[in-house]
Image: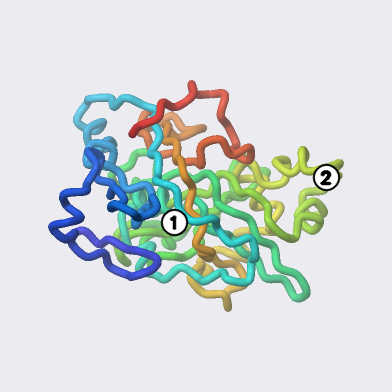
Amino acid sequence: MRNEYSAKSGPLRPPSKGEAKRKCRDGRLRPSRGQSPRSTECGVESATQRDSAAVWLDGQAPVIPFTIPCMPRSTPPSALAGIHPLPRAFFTRNPRRVARQLLGKILIRDLPALRLTARIVEVEAYLGTEDPAAHSAAGRTLRNAVLFGPPGHAYIYFIYGNHYCLNVSCEPEGKAGGVLFRALEPLSGIEEMARSRGIELRGPQDWPKLTAGPGRLCQAFGITRVRDNDLDLTSPESGLWIGDDAFHPRRVAVTPRIGITKAAEMPLRYFIAGNRFVSATKRFPSPPLRA
């Protein structure tokens, strides 16, 4: 049985007969008469989209990139006080689903007298031992042990000899899987992020320099392997954690992953369409909309 999760109500229930009649072709729920458009599971993927990686593994390249549109939700709260940590059940799932639903969530770094926050706008899914591009493809080692451990923990690695990358472990303990954070949209603590990055900001137009890219966001948040590897990202007590403020993106784009040579065509990169903090958009044509 598929382990589904809803931030509001926990495990998802089967649709009622009335809801089943209101299903769109791609599986989303149409609003009932007199009800404002609202998605109960924003960005639910169709079976074709959800299984696109499996199709690719059979030698049939999927049509990519594409977007997963969502029905409008109510206006997200502007205050940052109502951020709640994501439960471990959120991460005890396939990395594809975790990656898609991490978009719009908030990465938080609690410092002694300051809180850094930024919205997650771009991620990549890595599918464990069956994914040639994943660090866990060769099996469990001392370096990648976090990926085989409890879900919701930080996996940090050093790359190209000059920057760190932040990942979160997925799947039940003992089964590897992870999501790489590629870009964030800064919300608070921007001056501290600029100091950590060693750059001068002349205005909001420079903010993408802070967190657009996996290395940049780690530097802005002071993330290192020694300091943060294996931290529990579901617990505010860790000082580095992931929260939910009820914001949901309206459109999500899906493309192949960036900067890899193995399994490079698999559509496992997800980002909020139109967000200016996404790390790379010119590499792919504009994704077509899917109704």
Q: Label 2 amino acid? A: Ile
Nearer mark to the viewer, of 2 and 1: 2
- Residue projecting furthest to the bottom: 237
Farthest residue in the front direction? Answer: 34
The alpha-carbon separation of the residues under discs 2 and 1 comes to 32 Å
Find residue 257 and report its image quarter.
top left
Residue nearest the viewer, comparing 253 with 176 = 253
For numbered disc 2, what is the local secondary structure? loop
Q: Residue at left 79%, top 58%?
A: 192
Question: Nearer the N terminus, badge 2 or badge 1?
Answer: 1
The quarter holding residue 45 reads top left
**Residue 199: mark:** 2
Q: Is residue 177 visible?
A: no
- Quarter in which the C terminus is drawn: top left
Tell me residue 90's x, y (percent). Answer: 38, 64
Find residue 57 and name its label. none
Q: Quadrant of the N terminus?
A: bottom left
Q: Is residue 52 left or right of residue 144?
A: left
Q: Residue at x 58, y 74 (%)?
A: 238
Q: Residue at x 42, y 59 (%)?
A: 169
Name the residue: 30% across, 65% down.
Answer: 172
Please report contact status of discs 2 and 1: CB closer than 8 Å, yes or no.
Answer: no
Frontmost residue, 127 versus 188: 188
Residue that mark 1 sits on: 144
What amino acid is labelled 1 in the image? Asn
Image x and y of residue 88, in percent: 39, 70
Is residue 162 placed above or below 10 in the rendered structure?
Answer: above
**Of residues 221 and 163, the one drawn nearer to the viewer in this rendering:** 221
Classed neighbour count for the residue bearing mark 2: other residues with Cα under 10 Å, few (<14), some (14–19), many (≥20): few
